[in-house]
Structure formats: C-alpha cells, structure tokens
C-alpha cells in the first residue's frame, strides 16, 4: 500500500504538467495539494502496520485506537484532496485553447469529485449510519468517486499525452 500510494506523486506531477496552459498558481497548487495528500495517505498503512506490529503487547483499546486513526486518515483528510480536484477542475475548464488538453467533462467530473469527498468529514459525528466511517456516504461514495476520477483523469491524460506527441509531427509535415 505504501509503495502504491507513493506513485500518486509522479501521476500528480504529470497531471499538473498537462494542465500547464493554466496559471502557474493552479499548477503549483495542484502539486502542493498532491504532496499534502500523499503525505497524509502514507500515514494510513504505517498506522495499521503499527497496530499489528506487537498485538500481544498492546491492549485492545490501543489497537482499536490505531485502527480508528488509520480510518480517520483515510476518510477525514478530504480537504487537500478536494482542493486538488477543484484546482484540476479550474485548470481544465479555464483552458480556452483551440484544442483543449482535457475534455470539459473531465473538469466537471473533477468538481463532482471535490464535492463528493466532503461527506467523509462527517464521520467524526456519526458512529452508525450512512455518515459513519463505514457508511455509504462517508466511505463508499467518496472512495468510489475518487477511484472513478483517478481512472478517468488517467485515461484523459494518456489521450492528451498521445495527442500532444502526434500534433507536432502532423504540423511539421506542412
């Protein structure tokens, strides 16, 4: 999990580079949010590993507290992820070039992602129900939406990267 999650850094840098037509502030903001988000989510598997490291030496309450902390880090740390997604949306929707790097729907998907991650922050107030840590609104919806956003943006990044490689070749033929 730690190795997989750290791969978010080069992905985020590539995304920021592809949305580079927009202002440097948006690009640098994306990188800062990605760095903050990656730092936060790297703590999650470390916390769970710590909870499992010496189970015989820890009381059940301590183990549960470490486990809860890991889940809180996963779902409660939504603000940098939402801000990152919002900055991506602004960069995509502000691209008024002749051939936009990303389709407009990717900007709107990024806005939806930014909004639908927020219910994870409600888990501190609910122990059961849809807004609890294991509820549909605090757990399943944010993780599903983030995964869909990650896959959709990856696909559009690959297409944009391919298009950028082909366009200079096509224009040099003239």
Image (cartoon, grey):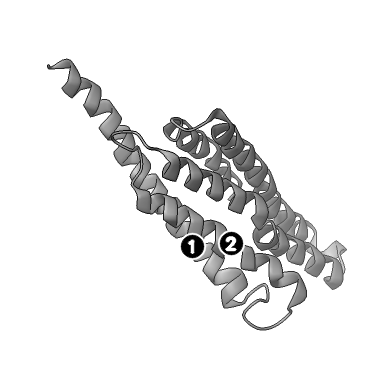
Pick the quarter of the image with the C terminus: top left
Look at 41% across and 48% down and name the residue there. Answer: 153
Q: Is residue 4 left or right of residue 169?
A: right
Look at 69% across and 64% down and name the residue there. Answer: 71
Q: Earlier in the sequence, mark 1 or mark 2?
A: 2
Vertical side of 30 occupied by 57: above or below: below
Quickly name the residue at label 2: 117
The x, y position of residue 68, in whole percent, is 75, 66
The x, y position of residue 151, in whole percent, is 40, 52
Q: Tell me if mark 2 has few (under 14), some (14-19) or many (20+) residues whose alpha carbon lies within 10 angstroms of its own.
A: many
Could you tell me how many numbered marks the image carries?
2
Quickly name the residue at label 1: 145
- Mark 1 lies on a secondary structure that is helix
Look at 36% across and 42% down and name the residue there. Answer: 102
Q: Quadrant of residue 92?
A: top left
Q: Tell me if mark 1 has few (under 14), some (14-19) or many (20+) residues whose alpha carbon lies within 10 angstroms of its own.
A: some
């Amino acid at each position: 999990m730690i190795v997989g999650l750290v791969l978010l850094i080069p992905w985020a840098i590539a995304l920021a580079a592809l949305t580079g037509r927009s202002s440097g502030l948006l690009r640098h903001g994306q990188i800062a949010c990605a760095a903050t988000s990656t730092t936060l989510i790297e703590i999650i598997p470390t916390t769970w590993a710590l909870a499992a490291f010496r189970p015989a030496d820890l009381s059940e309450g301590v183990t549960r507290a470490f486990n809860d902390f890991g889940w809180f880090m996963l779902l409660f740390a939504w603000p940098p992820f939402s801000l990152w997604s919002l900055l991506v949306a602004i960069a995509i929707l502000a691209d008024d070039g002749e051939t936009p790097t990303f389709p407009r729907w990717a900007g709107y998907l990024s806005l939806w992602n930014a909004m639908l991650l927020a219910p994870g922050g409600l888990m501190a107030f609910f122990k059961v129900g849809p807004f609890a840590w294991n509820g549909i609104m605090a757990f399943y919806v944010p993780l599903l939406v983030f995964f869909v956003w990650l896959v959709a943006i990856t696909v559009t990044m690959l297409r944009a990267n391919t298009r950028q490689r082909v366009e200079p070749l096509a224009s040099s033929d003239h």
